[in-house]
Image: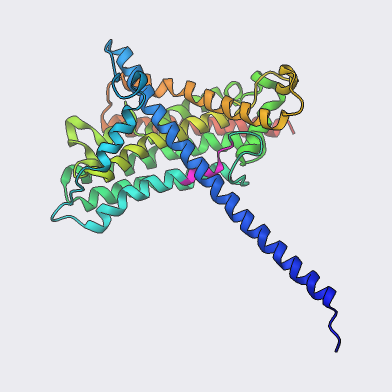
């Protein structure tokens, strides 16, 4: 049997090329993930600074001013301080549950960023069930809070964990029904397809105008999911000391702090994607590169502008939960559950029924 050396060389070169492609794909995947995580961390630091500045303005005080220019490094200083503080463990608590709780809360929220499109084809996972994957993964976060409260062996912590679980269950159902209405309008559950469906008519094509009731229900439900005032009952200071965070210190307490702001940024980005047109410029039939007279760098320039528009819409929307925190008082637990089950759930069901009827009529 005669073996042709040229065929052997061709096979070897092909296998080498395939291995190089696999290595390149892995490197590109890790670069994309770390870039996203770095951007998210910067985004959280900006939110913390914005909240402190806005709250200082509302309360007519100065706010952070010493750590960096305009106090912009104050959140970084607080994080560094928590990093070097002693990590205390409850003597009679379940140490394994106590330690794993904060990690569950943070990781479940971080995974939800996989399906957020920051621009055209600028998304880590363009899945056909993108929005429902977010709802499924984000429902894991309250489990981390419940585990943390139970593992602390503290009645205040456990009460806070139970409240977090009850609040999440109550408000996830109206939230899911609002997302289902958006999916029916867009004929897709992919986040990229939902943004593309809004881009046909520019500003008037936003789902905000086609789903005003759903937008209000989604806004209230997302505030409750983020445990922001007036829905911060799981960590009510006057009732539960600090809720599920009572026994925590050091980096574990910092993880809860990060998870809260990660969830807030995530909700704002999803409001931008589902209701505010995502990365689109919102002026129909006008191309951004042509508007600025740029042709050669249209791809890079369009991607940069898309990221900028997405983040600008998200941060403008953040003014609503930030100002709400310093404006409205905290409601009682029975009022919270009544609002979710007796008010928002019927409204979101009616909104879904109207959306389904309109889609069937238009066929």
- Above-or-below relation of 110 to 62: below
Using residue 201 as the reference point, say whether residue 275 is left or right of it. Answer: left
- Above-or-below relation of 94 to 51: below
Image quadrant in which you'd find residue 225: top left
Overall secondary structure of the magenta section: helix
Identify which residue is drawn at 60% across, 41% down. Answer: 123
Q: Position of residue 14 (x, y in %)?
A: 75, 66
Q: Is residue 125 visible?
A: yes
Q: Which residues are magenta?
A: 111-117
Farthest residue to the bottom: give it.
1
Using residue 118 as the reference point, say whether residue 58 is left or right of it. Answer: left
Which quarter of the figure is the N terminus placed in? bottom right
The verdict on residue 115 being magenta is yes
Using residue 168 as the reference point, say whether residue 277 is left or right of it. Answer: right
Q: Position of residue 328 (x, y in %)?
A: 31, 19
Q: Position of residue 214 (x, y in %)?
A: 52, 28
Q: Is residue 343 visible?
A: no
Image quadrant in which you'd find residue 209: top right
Identify which residue is drawn at 29% across, 40% down. Answer: 254
- Above-or-below relation of 203 to 242: above
Q: Position of residue 304 (x, y in %)?
A: 62, 29
Q: Nearer the viewer, residue 151 or 165?
A: 151
Image quadrant in which you'd find residue 185: top right
The verdict on residue 293 being magenta is no
Using residue 153 as the reference point, say whether residue 296 is left or right of it. Answer: right
């Amino acid at each position: 049997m005669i073996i042709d050396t040229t065929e052997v060389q061709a096979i070897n070169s092909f296998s080498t090329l395939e291995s190089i492609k696999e290595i390149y794909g892995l490197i590109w995947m890790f670069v994309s993930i770390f870039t996203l995580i770095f951007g998210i961390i910067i985004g959280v630091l900006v939110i913390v600074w914005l909240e402190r500045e806005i709250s200082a303005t509302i309360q007519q005080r100065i706010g952070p001013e010493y750590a960096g220019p305009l106090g912009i490094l104050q959140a970084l200083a607080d994080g560094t301080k928590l990093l070097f503080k002693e990590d205390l463990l409850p003597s009679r608590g379940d140490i394994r549950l106590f330690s794993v709780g904060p990690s569950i809360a943070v990781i479940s929220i971080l995974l939800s960023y996989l399906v957020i499109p920051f621009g055209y084809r600028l998304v880590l996972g363009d899945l056909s069930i993108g929005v429902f994957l977010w709802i499924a993964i984000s429902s894991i976060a309250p489990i981390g809070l419940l585990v943390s409260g139970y593992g602390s062996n503290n009645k205040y912590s456990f009460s806070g964990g139970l409240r977090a679980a009850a609040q999440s269950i109550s408000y996830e159902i109206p939230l899911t029904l609002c997302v289902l209405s958006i999916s029916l309008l867009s004929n897709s559950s992919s986040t990229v397809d939902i943004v593309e469906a809004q881009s046909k008519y520019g500003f008037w094509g936003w789902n905000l105008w086609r789903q005003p009731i759903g937008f209000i229900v989604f806004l209230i439900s997302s505030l409750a999911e983020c445990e922001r005032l007036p829905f911060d009952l799981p960590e009510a200071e006057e009732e539960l000391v600090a809720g599920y965070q009572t026994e925590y210190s050091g980096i574990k307490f910092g993880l809860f702090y990060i998870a809260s702001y990660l969830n807030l940024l995530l909700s704002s980005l999803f409001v931008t994607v589902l209701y505010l047109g995502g990365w689109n410029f919102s002026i129909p039939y006008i191309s951004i590169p042509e508007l600025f007279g740029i042709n050669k760098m249209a791809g890079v320039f369009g991607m940069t502008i898309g990221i900028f528009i997405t983040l600008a819409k998200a941060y403008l929307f953040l003014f609503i939960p930030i100002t709400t925190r310093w404006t409205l008082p905290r409601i009682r637990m029975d009022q919270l559950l009544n609002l979710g089950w007796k008010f928002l759930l019927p409204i979101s069901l009616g909104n879904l029924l109207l959306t389904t009827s309109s889609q069937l009529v238009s066929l």
